[in-house]
Image: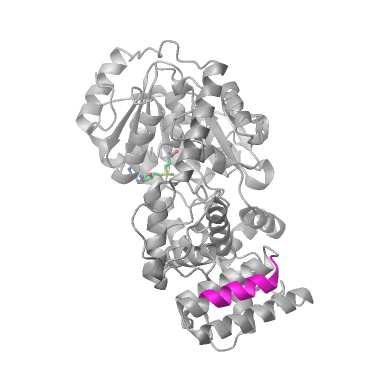
Amino acid sequence: IHTGVGIGRSRVQHFLYASLSNPLTTPRRKGGGWSSNQLFCTASLIVNRNNSQGKKRNPAKPVDKSKINSNVSPHRAASAVRLLRIEQGGAFADLLNADYRESAIDDEMDYIQRTLGFRTNPLDARNTRLVTDIVAGVVRWKRYLDYLIFSLYDGAKNVKDMEPLLQQILRIGVYEIVKLGMPPYAVVNENVTLARAALRAGAGNMVNGILRRVASDREKDMLPLPKVEGDDRSKARALSVKYSHPVWMIRRWMTYLGQEGAIQLMEWNNSPPSFSLRANSGRGVSRDDLVLLLKKLNVQHELSPHMTEFVRLSTGLQSVIQAGLLKEGMCAVQDEGAGLVVSVVDPQPGETIIDCCAAPGGKALFMASRLQGQGSVIAIDVNQGRLRVLEEAAKVQALEGVVNACQDDIRSFAVGASIRADKVLLDAPCSGLGVLCKKPDMRWKRTLKDLEQLILLQDELLDAASLLVKPGGILVYSTCSVDPGENKERVESFLTRHPEFIVEAVHKYVPNEFISEEGFYTSHPTKHFLDGAFAARLFRVSI
Ligand SMILES: C[S@@+](CC[C@H](N)C(=O)[O-])C[C@H]1O[C@@H](n2cnc3c(N)ncnc32)[C@H](O)[C@@H]1O
């Protein structure tokens, strides 16, 4: 029996046959737990190593100093370039900022040089955090920022008429003044300098005019805003500017959450996200151990009231990342909303679990850690690149003996397979409408047409996943959406096609506050202050 990740489909099936008749019992590492002494030593080592790494953060390759423009603010130049890359589809808004490799910092400077024609002074840790915050904020507030810019500037009818770099510089400036409340004088000067250096004097003049006008209108509390009035369509259009979301999403939310509910959800999506960490029992790290490490790093935290492995951070995620706790596999960043889906699956040692859409592995690895070294998680995903991330994470978290990755489309896998698992998780591709707070660019990428296509795909994947459940076994269908069309309606439709399944209410598995009247698990951001998530537990009564 193989214990490594990355095996092909036929080997997975062979593995399954073997493990079903003879459950895999990988023993837990002897002495796998960590003493508090070990943990303190580890934390010190990590912190010290990080400090020494910090000294090495100067660019490794020789820099042509003549091309460094030290008048330009590094975080604004980097933000403008990153925003351009996001808009052109080459990057995404990374809130974790987890890439502290020298090469990544070099890459950022290379992009700046290629786009603007010069380098800036290097980004220090504070500047790097500012870039993350500004980029995420500008992406979130894009529609509102553009409304302000084009209400105050009549040279262009709409965004498309303005050159892209100028547009990003203006958005950054307006965001800094209006949403961050930064001193207007500095914001105007710095963004004018950037526009002059990266474009031309005339662009600097335009930035000067618009930002000054924004600053003065804000001072007088006279910033323009459309009135929320008229029929639903007009109201949704005005709300779309005020809360910077696509009209189609607002109209959908107004239908099933009401106008107030839709506004609350948008306010949540526009707020800075908070993060949770899961202590990795795969490496023998308990939540108490993790708490000791966080105390050592002076990171504020509180215990999750819902799950014994989870800790909530108020701030300090960057310190956790820089200290290497993720890289060392001590813990993983995971939202409790997603973690509770694993509680619905309720993995038990010795079980064989198939995760049909497993990558990048958040739930697969948490399920694997709950198996305590006995049993297996077959992690299937159609996307090779994302599956590679899962495989790497399985190694880091010392779970590769339990997780077996397999690249395949679950629809063809299920048709050819004669295997049946104890539990099958289908964490379906979805609109992600429950996690917009953590994914600032997602709201602009999704369309109503996507949602309609995803619903068709979810039905097909559910049909396929159901083939893999043994009689008496469990199928869990989950999403990170708050849309009933992707959640309870998909389950209702599945049950009409599959009378061999019935709903098992999730009372035994998650706290009551998360249980819908139909017996499903639902986490709603504005009710539970977690990511949105949904899971239904379906019991296979017959063959
Ligand atoms: C919501 S994500 C899964 C997240 C994952 N469960 C986790 O916790 O990290 C959905 C995944 O479904 C995969 N997927 C989409 N269509 C698929 C298919 N037909 N067969 C297998 N995987 C598929 C995507 O590649 C994507 O990784």
Q: Quadrant of ligand 1?
A: top left
Asked if the magenta segment contains residue 342, the reply would be: no
The image shows residue 410, relative to residue 208, as above or below, that is above
Q: Outermost residue, right direction?
A: 220
Viewer-side residue, 206 vs 398: 206
Q: Outermost residue, left direction?
A: 10
Quadrant holding the C terminus: top left
Kindly identify the residue that appears in the image at 45 percent across and 41 percent down.
53
Asked if residue 98 lies left or right of residue 16, the reply is right
Looking at the magenta stretch, what is its main secondary structure?
helix
Q: Position of residue 288 (x, y in %)?
A: 60, 22
Viewer-side residue, 233 vs 87: 87
Asked if residue 258 lies left or right of residue 322, the reply is right
Q: Position of residue 192 (x, y in %)?
A: 57, 77
The image shows residue 418, relative to residue 300, as above or below, that is above
Kindly identify the residue that appears in the image at 64 percent across and 57 percent down.
266
Q: Is residue 89 visible?
A: no
Quadrant holding the N terminus: top left
- Colour setup of the view: one colour
Q: How many numbered circles are shown?
A: 0
Q: Is residue 5 visible?
A: yes
The image shows residue 486, relative to residue 392, as above or below, that is below
Residue interval drawn in magenta: 182-194
Q: Position of residue 515 (x, y in %)?
A: 63, 34
Viewer-side residue, 239 vs 467: 239
Kindly identify the residue that appears in the image at 40 percent across and 66 percent down.
65
Q: Position of residue 225 (x, y in %)?
A: 70, 75
